[in-house]
Image (tube, grey):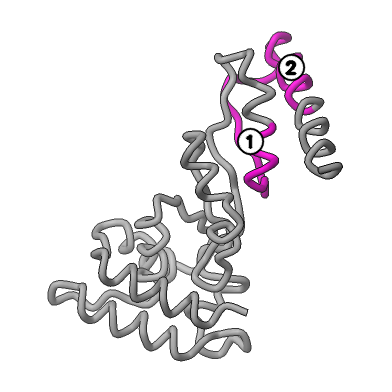
């Protein structure tokens, strides 16, 4: 309970700073947070409730098939309930471990499953594991944050935006990821 009080007090102080900056014209009425837990986000939004013109647009969290903590710790649920979008940092896992077979943390069984699903849902077009992994995130209502200087990877990422996995494919990936979570 002491920790919860600390979180609330900390977020109240942050909210006071945001309100002051807004009143001075030093920041806009909409902002994003980075790495907030569900409890932190709840406390911040509650602290800002008296100033309805200020809102949190996004919470940037590490989220991928390899790192599903925001799903299991309630962060995604809290974001949805508070109408705060989620940006997935490292959407292909740390160092793209979800889709690069040579990565030491790559789950090769999951990679084969991503390839198989890509062949099944493509409507005659082979979808890559990158596209399937990113599409899984988008089906969860999350915006993947991508940064690359590799033209091929950028092209693949763009291809993930043009279609959606069906509920069955999402469930299969959920079950596989849950079964391999440490």
| Residue at left offset 28%, top offset 79% | 117
- Looking at the figure, which quarter contains the C terminus? bottom right
| Residue at left offset 26%, top offset 70% | 168
Q: Position of residue 28 (x, y in %)?
A: 61, 20
Picture quarter containing residue 19? top right
| Residue at left offset 82%, top offset 33% | 10
Q: Nearer the viewer, residue 2 or 109?
A: 2
Q: Is residue 107 left or right of residue 129?
A: right
- Looking at the figure, which quarter contains the N terminus? top right
Q: Are marks 2 and 1 in contact (CB under 8 Å)?
A: no
Q: Is residue 21 above or below residue 86?
A: above
In what element is the residue under mark 1? helix
| Residue at left offset 53%, top offset 55% | 88
Number of numbered markers: 2
Residue 21's disc is 2
Residue 42's disc is 1
Q: Position of residue 181 (x, y in %)?
A: 57, 78
Region in magenta: 14-43
In what element is the residue under mark 2? helix
């Amino acid at each position: 309970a002491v920790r919860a009080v600390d979180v609330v007090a900390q977020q109240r102080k942050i909210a006071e700073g945001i309100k002051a900056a807004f009143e001075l014209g030093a920041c806009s009425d909409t902002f994003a947070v980075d790495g907030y837990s569900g409890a932190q986000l709840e406390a911040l939004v509650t602290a800002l409730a008296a100033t309805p013109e200020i809102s949190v647009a996004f919470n940037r969290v590490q989220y991928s098939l390899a790192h599903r903590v925001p799903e299991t710790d309630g962060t995604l649920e809290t974001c949805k309930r508070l109408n705060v979008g989620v940006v997935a940092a490292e959407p292909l896992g740390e160092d793209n471990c979800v889709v690069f077979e040579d990565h030491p943390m790559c789950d090769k069984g999951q990679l084969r499953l991503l390839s198989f699903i890509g062949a099944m849902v493509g409507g005659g077009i082979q979808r890559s594991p990158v596209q399937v992994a990113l599409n899984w995130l988008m089906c969860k209502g999350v915006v993947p944050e991508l940064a690359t200087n590799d033209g091929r990877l950028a092209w693949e990422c763009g291809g993930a935006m043009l279609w959606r996995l069906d509920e069955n494919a999402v469930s299969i990936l959920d079950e596989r990821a849950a079964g391999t979570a440490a």
